[in-house]
Amino acid sequence: MEFGIYTFGETTVDPLTGVRVTPGQRLRELIDEIAFADDLGLDVFGVGEHHRPDYAVSAPPVVLAAAAERTKRIRLTSAVTVLSSEDPVRTFQQFATLDLLSGGRAEIMAGRGSFIESFPLFGQRLDDYDTLFTENLELLLRLRQSERVTWEGGHRAAIDDRGVYPRPEREIPLWIAVGGTPQSVVRAGVLGLPLALAIIGGEPARYAPLIDLYREAGQRGGQPAEVLKVGINAHGFIADTSQEAADIFWPPYQDTMSRIGRERGWPPLTRGQYEAGMSPRGHLLVGSPQQVIDKILAHHEHFRHDRFLMQMSLGPLPRKAHLRSMELLATVVAPAVNKALGASAAVQAPAA
């Protein structure tokens, strides 16, 4: 299994100190975090796109290009590119440039996004939410396949046999990010695109039918099993003990989820709900290394996923604790999970 981290580059007020980190400071810290993840041997680092004052990253390719100059092997992906409100031509050009700068390490994780600020900002109508994504995905796939493109849709100017440059030296991996919509997982399966499922609430086992639906749609569409990859994105934090992890992660998590909840009409998050999310059947991967190992392995029984990305920094975390969590993910959790999965595969393999 591949392991990695994703973040939105939060600039919220620290609930313990009352101090707000500046966008410049957060971006500089973020580049350091990506370089540290590379040094630790993690496989992937994802940076999300938002257009709000509480996040520093509105242009993931720019941040990832800066990180490319500080890293050697880690793959660099958006998490996500809000494709409904993006120009697919510029998206392709930006990630092709990133891919060339990084020596073939760029990836795109395309989704609809859970925030809507980008639509009025870029002159898009929310009523076109679905058709924009469908058309823009179609065009982005066309751009990956062909140097010269002729294309016409309903939401942007037509393209008449135009070349789009620069061209990457390989086809940039494109993941479809979903939050639980059956139509989205079916589309990804039919197209043979890897699927990134975000589990940020509820009981993870309930998402298993969506993964089954994705693989069934891919098989019906004639896609080989090896292209139907699954990634799980989830909130989590690791410390040396379960109590330490719970106590450190609670203030920023409670602040972030309650703040977003106020915008969407949800009640404030309670400590009881938080601890339920940390339970063996809950959605939060917060605890000691062994607790997180056990939970990832339990999830793998449901999803048989190929990649796991953890979002640790939902809000301001103590810097030392944040880096320690990254270290534990890379040096303790990832090796133990892959050792267990390797042993399981060996047991299940038929005798020669």
Image (cartoon, rainbow, N blue to C red):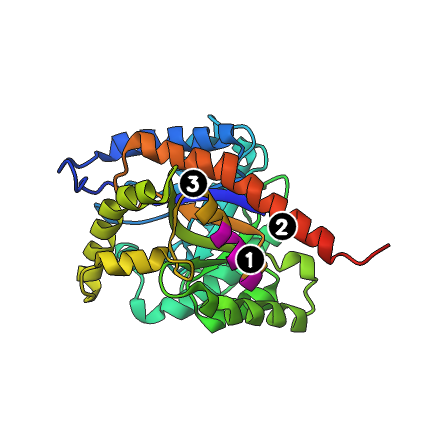
Mark 3–mark 1 distance (CA, rounded to whole Å): 31 Å
- Residue that mark 2 sits on: 341
SS at badge 1: helix
- Residue 312, quarter of the rendered image: top left
Magenta-drawn segment: 294-302
Amino acid type shown at disc 1: His
Q: Earlier in the sequence, mark 2 or mark 1?
A: 1
- Residue 230, quarter of the rendered image: bottom right
Q: Position of residue 187 (x, y in %)?
A: 54, 68
User: In the image, what residue occupies the spot 29% across and 45% down?
Assistant: 249
Q: Is residue 131 visible?
A: yes
Camera-side residue: 351 or 142? 351
Residues marked 3 and 1 touching at CB (< 8 Å): no
Near mark 2 (Cα within 10 A), the count class, few <14, some 14-19 or many ≥20, is some
- Residue that mark 3 sits on: 61
Mark 3–mark 2 distance (CA, rounded to whole Å): 33 Å
- Residue that mark 1 sits on: 300
User: In the image, what residue occupies the spot 28% across and 38% down?
Assistant: 317
